[in-house]
Image (tube, grey):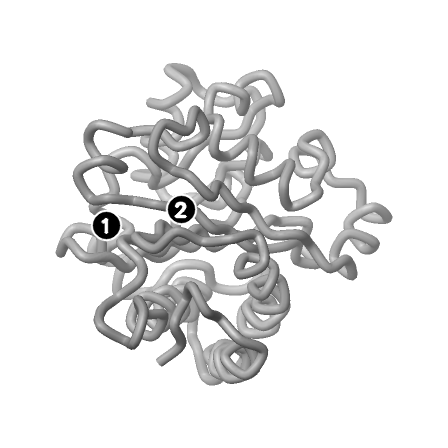
């Protein structure tokens, strides 16, 4: 299993191949996302394979408000404390989660990140980590919120950067310092993702208990394409697993 702090080209090729195959036969994007986050959580290790390198791994994707179920719409509206001006408003939705606590292995048990509304650039600024994620991936916020089809086509072909906060403790970009970062000894936060032909952003965020360098983070840039290949065949089709939909009604 790859040592995340010494992630080599060989490791990158192996992990990339595994991620690319995870969309095969999937019935929903949530199903693919769940496989991806659990693979990364289970297989990226500390030095000498002694334990999981990650504390928490999550996959997010933007969706129009109108495409969300009633529970997620209520959650997003609650964060805004208002109904959206338009049903086309983008929301950053948690599709899958894997982590060291039982409640971190279900998107439905997330306390604050099930569906984050993105009504405007100004509103997004109240979420420093999301702002940094978008900027470090090399994206324009306004383009993400109101994608132009011609621009989306160009963006979908682009290779994106990675998002890295090398020192999580004390960072203004990582919230919940007292409740999460410090007690769980989060050292670094790593993210990678891109834009789908639908104009939606997908991003994986990994909270690591191992300090990560920029050199290591850069190795993950290629994995964004592998994740994209896994979820691309189902983009625009079923987002959530049918079993979960029934349970949430």
x, y (%) of residue 214?
Answer: 57, 52
Q: State the mark number for residue 187.
A: none
38 vs 116: above or below:
below
State the residue in front, 60 or 117: 60
Circle 1 packing at 10 Å, graded few (<14), some (14-19), many (20+), is few
State the residue in front, 25 or 228: 228
- Find residue 72 and report its image quarter: top left
**Horizontal placement of 84 versus 187: left or right?**
right
Circle 2 packing at 10 Å, graded few (<14), some (14-19), many (20+), is many
> In the image, what residue occupies the spot 80% across and 41% down?
148
> In the image, what residue occupies the spot 62% across and 62% down?
221
Q: State the mark number for residue 248.
A: 1
**Horizontal placement of 69 versus 139: left or right?**
left
State the residue in front, 73 or 220: 220
Question: Which residue is under mark 2?
Answer: 188
**Horizontal placement of 66 versus 78: left or right?**
right
Cα separation between marks 2 and 1:
34 Å
The tally of labels here is 2
The local secondary structure at tag 2 comes to strand
x, y (%) of residue 186?
Answer: 30, 44
> In the image, what residue occupies the spot 54% across and 83% down?
10
State the residue in front, 62 or 174: 174
Looking at the image, tell me whether mark 2 or mark 1 is earlier in sequence order. Answer: 2
Q: In which quarter of the image is the N terminus?
A: bottom left
Q: Which residue lies most toward the right here?
A: 150
């Amino acid at each position: 299993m790859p040592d995340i702090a010494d992630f080599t080209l060989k490791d990158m090729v192996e992990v990339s191949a595994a991620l690319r195959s995870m969309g095969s036969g999937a019935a929903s994007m949530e199903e693919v996302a769940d496989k991806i986050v659990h693979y990364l959580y289970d297989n990226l290790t500390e030095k000498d394979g002694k334990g999981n390198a990650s504390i928490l791994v999550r996959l997010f994707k933007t969706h129009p408000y109108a495409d969300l179920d009633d529970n997620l719409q209520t959650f997003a509206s609650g964060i805004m404390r208002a109904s959206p001006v338009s049903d086309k408003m983008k929301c950053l939705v948690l599709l899958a989660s894997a982590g060291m606590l039982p409640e971190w292995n279900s998107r439905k048990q997330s306390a604050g990140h099930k569906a984050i509304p993105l009504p405007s650039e100004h509103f997004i600024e109240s979420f420093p980590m999301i702002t940094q994620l978008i900027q470090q991936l090399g994206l324009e916020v306004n383009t993400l919120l109101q994608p132009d089809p011609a621009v989306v086509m160009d963006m979908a072909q682009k290779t994106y950067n990675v998002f890295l906060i090398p020192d999580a403790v004390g960072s203004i970009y990582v919230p919940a310092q007292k409740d999460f970062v410090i007690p769980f000894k989060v050292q670094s936060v790593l993210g990678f993702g891109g834009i789908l032909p639908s104009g939606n952003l997908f991003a994986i965020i990994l909270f690591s208990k191992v300090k990560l360098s920029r050199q290591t983070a850069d190795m993950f840039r290629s994995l964004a394409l592998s994740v994209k290949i896994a979820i691309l065949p189902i983009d625009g089709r079923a987002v959530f697993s049918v079993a979960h939909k029934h349970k949430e009604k």
